[in-house]
Structure formats: structure tokens, C-alpha cells
Amino acid sequence: MRDVQALARDASPEATAALGRLADGSPSDVASGGGAARAELEKRATTDVNAYIAAWTAVTRKAPWGTAFVRDALGNPARADVAATALPRGEPRLIPFVPDLEGAVERLSAGHRGSIVAGVLASVGPEAHAHVERRLLDPKTRGAMCDGIGLPEASPDAKSLVLKVPADARNHASCVDVVLVMAATDDAVLDWVAQSAEPGLVSAAAKSTLACSRLSAIWAKGLTSRAAETHAALAVPLQLSLQRCAPVLDPVVAHLLSTAPRARSVILQAIDAYSTEMADLALTCKALREGWVAGESARIRERAGDALANGCRFAVGRR
């Protein structure tokens, strides 16, 4: 008992760890100090992450008090964030706590928090698949869940879910950010954006800091693989892309005009004949002069004529 009192006066991580070891003792055994040690850890539970480090270490020792301590904290919105900070990421021993982690994300969403706990949940892997998916489908927890998925320790399974859920289950800025960060380096995600992403997400890519070379790859693949009836919704995203990346997109757009008849309509709808970026579309203007749009509707031919008569005048000799 004297050991517990001495350790209680010492707020160091080492003293808290020692309290955790004493807490393994039986609560009914006064001499062991188990109950007193647990009571001291409970006093620190709202603010001291070291109490949860001690509790998780107890979990690894299979000491029952550790599991109860962690579960109680995850069930308490005032303690859940502190507890989650101490938990490991991607640890198989987290699997029994998955329902507790999901419940904590749901409870914390009322206060627009929960991303720390969501990060732990996202790190678990396939065993947490259904739980992560539920939090994405719930608009109250979607932002926190995507914040958690955006952390480096999130599992590939959690990251893939952002692409697999229905479009309205990722209509949060944090979810869009997750996709764009992945698209910056992952070619498989970039292909998914090109071929399957909703127009709003493609618009976000156009306005983001995604490299122009990656953005041009989206259009090179997207306008040749998507169904023609979906192209109308892509005119605005393509226009935004041209505003930011016209020099890089120019050869892609020119090639599509020449070789992809079903892409011509959306390209002409996206081109602003009077915009400054027309000066960077010399190859596109060359393709228009070659008469590739002759078979299009009168409205599309008119837009091509406007581009040639106006913006394309400034693109002469640029390439």
C-alpha cells in the first residue's frame, strides 16, 4: 500500500507504469495494492495518456483490468480521445475492441470529434471492414472516419472502402482529400478517378494541387473509357482542368479530338473560346482546323468556329 501512495505522488510515466503492474493484483488483497493502484489510475483517466499506456500494457499481459479500463474509456466521450492516443495502430490485439472503437466514433461525432479514435479503427484492417463502412455511410461520422482513413497508419482495406462506398458516402471534404492524396501517388486510384469517380470529385481534382501530369492522365483515360452519355457532366470538370493545366492538357485534348469522336462534344463544351488559356492550346487549335468536328451538331460546330475565330488566334506559333 505504501508503494501505491509513493507512486501516486510521482506523476512520471515510469511511476504510472509501476501502478499498472500493481493493478494486476486482486482488488480484495489490500497488501498487493491492486485496488488502490487501479483507483489511482482512474483518477488520472481523463487527462493522463500514461494511464492508458499502462492499461494497454496490461492488455498485452492479459490482465483483465486493462481490457476493462480501455473499454470503459472508449465508452466515455470525455476519455475516448485520450485512450485512443495510447493505443497501438494495426495491432491484432485491437480486434476485440473494434465494436468499442466504432461506438466511440459514433458518440464523439456529436461534438464534431472522433478522428483520433477513427484512426485507430481504420488501422485494424479487414476485421474492421463493416465497422468502417458503417461510419462512412453515416453522414454524422463520415468526416471523422475519413480523417482517420487519411492517417498514414490506416490499413489498405480502410482506404479502399472510400472508393467502394456509394458516391454520397464520400461527399465530405475529408473524404475527397483522402482520394486526392491517394491519387497523387497511386496509379490504381488515379485510374479509378478517371473511369469511375463522380463528376464532383473530378472537379475537386481539377481545382486541387494534383500535378497537371496526373490530371491529364485522368482525361486521357476518362474520356475514352466512360460511356458517352456520362460526358455531359464532365464539361465543367474539364473546363476547370484547362484553366489550371492548359499547356499539359493541350496534347491530350488535341489527340482526343483527332482519335476519339465521342469525346469531341464534351471537349468543345469545355473550351472557352474567349479565355486566356486558349493561348496555351496550340495543338488543340490545330486539330480544330483539321476539321475533326465537321460531323458534330450545329451547336458544337459553332463553338469550334468561335474558338478558331477568337482564342485560337493567340495560340498561333506557340508550338
Image (spheres, helix red, strand yellow):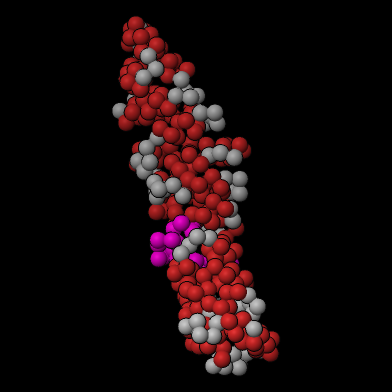
Q: Is residue 234 visible?
A: no
The residue at the point 57 percent across, 36 percent down is 107
- Measured as percent of width and height from the top left, residue 57 is found at 33, 28
The residue at the point 51 percent across, 85 percent down is 317
- Measured as percent of width and height from the top left, residue 185 is found at 40, 61
Magenta-highlighted residues: 179-199
The one nearer the camera, 299 or 288, is: 288
Prevailing secondary structure class for the magenta stretch in the rendered image: helix
The residue at the point 54 percent across, 56 percent down is 176
191 falls in the magenta region: yes
- Relative to 44, say whether 136 is above or below: below
18 falls in the magenta region: no
Q: Is residue 110 left or right of residue 157?
A: right
Quarter of the image for residue 170 reads: bottom right
The residue at the point 47 percent across, 76 percent down is 220
- Measured as percent of width and height from the top left, residue 260 is found at 51, 85
Quarter of the image for residue 203 reads: bottom right
